[in-house]
Image (tube, rainbow, N blue to C red):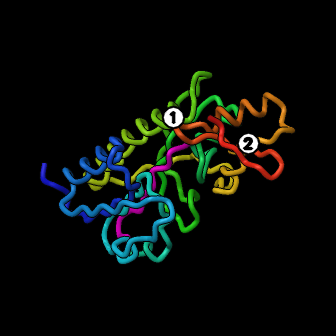
Amino acid sequence: MPKSPYSVLIATKDDGEDEAVRKAVRYCEANFENVSVQRGNWGDPLPLDIQGFRGDILLSYMSRWVIPDYVLNNVQVAAINFHPASPEYPGIGCNNFALYEGATEFGATCHHMAPVVDTGDIIRVERFPIHESDDVESLMVRCYDYMLVMLYDVVDLLIAGKALPTSDEKWTRKPFTRKQLDELGRITTDMDPAEIEKRIRATSYREWKPEVVVGQHRFKLM
């Protein structure tokens, strides 16, 4: 099958070790004639190649940027985000808040992009159970697996020139913010043991640990 003539821009995170990102990029490059990839970290300025993009498809896949409306308006076919959470958890820190709230299921969401993050019409949602053994990393890894398969399926529809499906799913709350996530990662001495355990489970990931606040002093858990 010949490559699709669509021009595609992929906005993603700058992590050369992330196999899911590499697979997503490779799949697009194998199936579209013109693919541009823009990688960045949290806090990086929006690249000029994204600001000036005028093409057919924009895919936000683990992107660290909020794409402004003037860019979205210049996309001819579809501007799509793959969100690493189900619609109950928009914004940042999705798996953290799901673990903290004791959710029994999680998922991945594909949706049309809108100027306000995680508010656009939903295309598809994939869900899976959260187990008592899950932590931040295990939940994230499983979510990324579901999200990658979702990308394959959506890209296949775009290649074939088919209409994207419309889901009945809706976002259920305002997006979580960085401030809320930072607050979740703070433990104070007046918290009861159950609350402390919930916060430790919800915010511990490799070298990242919650912060213990004692008076004017702050300590990182080991």
Marks 2/1: CA–CA distance: 21 Å
Q: At x 50% / y 37%, what residue is drawn?
A: 140
Please determine whether, in this image, residue 74 is positioned above or below residue 61. Answer: below
The residue under label 2 is 212
Rendering coords of residue 69 (x, y %): 50, 73
Percent x, y for residue 106?
A: 57, 35
Helix, strand or loop at label 1? It is helix
In this rendering, would 51 be left or right of 8?
right
Residue 188: image x %, image y %? 80, 42
Q: Is residue 79 visible?
A: yes
Q: Position of residue 44 (x, y in %)?
A: 46, 66
What is the quadrant of residue 72 in the picture? bottom left
Q: Is residue 81 above or below residue 212?
A: below
Please tell me which residue lies in front, 172 or 12.
12
Question: Magenta segment range?
Answer: 75-85
Picture quarter containing residue 88? top right
Q: What residue is disc 1 on?
A: 137
**Residue 194 left/right relative to 147:** right
Is 208 located above or below residue 195 in the figure?
Answer: below
